[in-house]
Amino acid sequence: TTQHWKIVDGQTVNGTLEFYDATDSATRMAIKGDGNVGIGTSNPGHKLDVYGNVNGTYLTELKNTHTTNGYGLVVTAGDDENVKVVEFRNLAETKHFTMLGNGNVGIGTTSPSGMLHLKGDNTAGIILENTTNATDIDIDYYNNANAVQSRIRYSEGAGSFHFQPNVSSASSHVTIDY
């Protein structure tokens, strides 16, 4: 089938430049007079709105294929530490992930009060999964000299937890074997 395209002003919305698919009677891209751009919508409400009904794959992909210096995505927003820089929601508008201007990240909360704030109904937690048997999983606290100061270690092979408030001292730890 040959597609028939039109670039028109106001095909479906007055004052909007539209890339219109006349074959399927659909606006594929629109630029409003205020500069808002829409892909898959003729009436974008933001600087860039991308709409689609995509099944079994992602709606959009940003890919930099440079092999040695391929940077990804930069998001810059506001100068207030409480501004939501990034927010991920589902179609029901449930907010699942929020990053504020101060760097705090919230999962399950839109107002994280610490660098990482997890909140959920019987689901708030962190899963650390090691795919190699008989190895350690560490949670380390670094001091301002960027050196490990304290550590919580799970030793899979030995089946024990070690609490080391001072990593530089071999005698400064508590071990729980099971």
Image (spheres, rainbow, N blue to C red):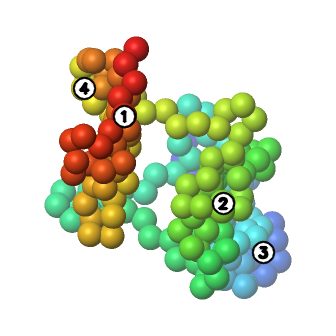
Nearer mark to the viewer, of 1 and 4:
1
Residue at the spot of label 4: 135
Q: Residue at x 72, y 31 (%)?
A: 122
Mark before the other along the chain sequence, 1 or 3: 3
Residue at the spot of label 1: 174
Mark before the other along the chain sequence, 4 or 2: 2
Q: Looking at the rendered structure, which numbered label has been put on residue 125?
A: none
In percent of width and height, residue 63 lies at 36, 56
> Dots 3 and 4: beta carbons under 8 Å?
no
Looking at numbered disc 2 in the image, what kind of residue is underneath it? Pro
Looking at numbered disc 1 in the image, what kind of residue is underneath it? Val
Nearer mark to the viewer, of 4 and 2:
4
Left or right of residue 154: residue 84? right
- Of residues 75 and 66, the one nearer the viewer is 75
In percent of width and height, residue 134 lies at 24, 19
- Of residues 108 and 74, the one nearer the viewer is 108
- Of residues 135 and 32, the one nearer the viewer is 135
Alpha carbon distance from label 1 to label 4:
19 Å
Mark before the other along the chain sequence, 2 or 1: 2
Residue at the spot of label 2: 112
Left or right of residue 84: residue 177? left
Looking at numbered disc 4 in the image, what kind of residue is underneath it? Thr
Q: Is residue 177 above or below residue 171?
A: above
